[in-house]
Image: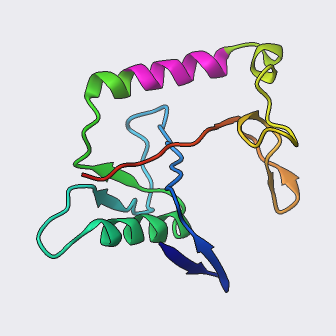
């Protein structure tokens, strides 16, 4: 799948997904969150779903997925694992720090407009297989 954004052409061999979970379920926002169903329907195929995901990644930069096969138990366990990981002491998290020879891992020094963001991340690869 080729996607053109800001004049640059990219070949997407996989879809990388950032999972953002608000800490307060009552969080309100005026921003509309795109909702993307992974269930192909008549007249809509995997390429259509991939393009919708790519577009949402560009603007606004995140999305909500529906019609996936992930159980509520799995999602609960994933959230618990992330909360546990990010509550660890810095030296423990830094043991898997991202560096020049390892593009994946923990980092807390992401830059936006040449300034360090106020966030911690763990970067991994998630392959999304559509039904």
Q: Nearer the viewer, residue 100 or 5?
A: 100
Above or below 98: residue 6:
below
Q: Main secondary structure of the magenta part?
A: helix
Residue 114 part of the magenta-drawn span: no
Q: Quadrant of residue 5?
A: bottom right
Residue 108 sits above or below residue 59 on the image: above
Quarter of the rendering containing residue 88: top right
Colour logic = rainbow
Residue 131 percent coordinates (x, y): 24, 51
| Near-viewer residue (119 or 54) | 54
Q: Is residue 80 magenta?
A: yes
Total numbered labels placed on residues in the image: 0
- The residue positioned 67% from the left and 86% from the top of the image is 7
Horizontal placement of 41 versus 31: left or right? left
Image side of residue 96 versus residue 24, left or right: right
Q: Quadrant of residue 9?
A: bottom right
Q: Going 42% across and 63% down the picture, which residue do you hit?
A: 53
Residue at the extreme left: 42
For residue 40, side relative to residue 63 (left or right):
left
**Residue at 39% of width from left, 35% of height from top?**
25
Q: x, y percentage for residue 79?
A: 46, 25
> In the image, residue 35 lies at what x, y percent?
32, 59
115 or 9: nearer the eye?
Answer: 9
Say left or right for 59 vs 32. right
The magenta segment is: 77-87
Q: Position of residue 30 (x, y in %)?
A: 43, 61
């Amino acid at each position: 799948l080729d996607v053109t954004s800001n004049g640059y052409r990219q070949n997407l061999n996989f879809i990388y997904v950032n999972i953002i979970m608000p800490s307060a379920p009552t969080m309100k926002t005026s921003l509309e969150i795109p909702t993307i169903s992974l269930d192909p329907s008549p007249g809509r195929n995997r390429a259509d779903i991939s393009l919708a995901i790519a577009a949402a990644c560009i603007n606004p930069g995140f999305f909500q997925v529906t019609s996936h096969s992930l159980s509520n138990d799995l999602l609960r366990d994933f959230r618990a694992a992330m909360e546990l990981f990010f509550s660890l002491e810095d030296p423990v998290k830094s043991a898997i720090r991202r560096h020049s020879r390892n593009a994946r891992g923990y980092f807390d020094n992401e830059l936006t407009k040449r300034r360090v963001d106020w966030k911690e991340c763990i970067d991994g690869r998630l392959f999304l297989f559509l039904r």
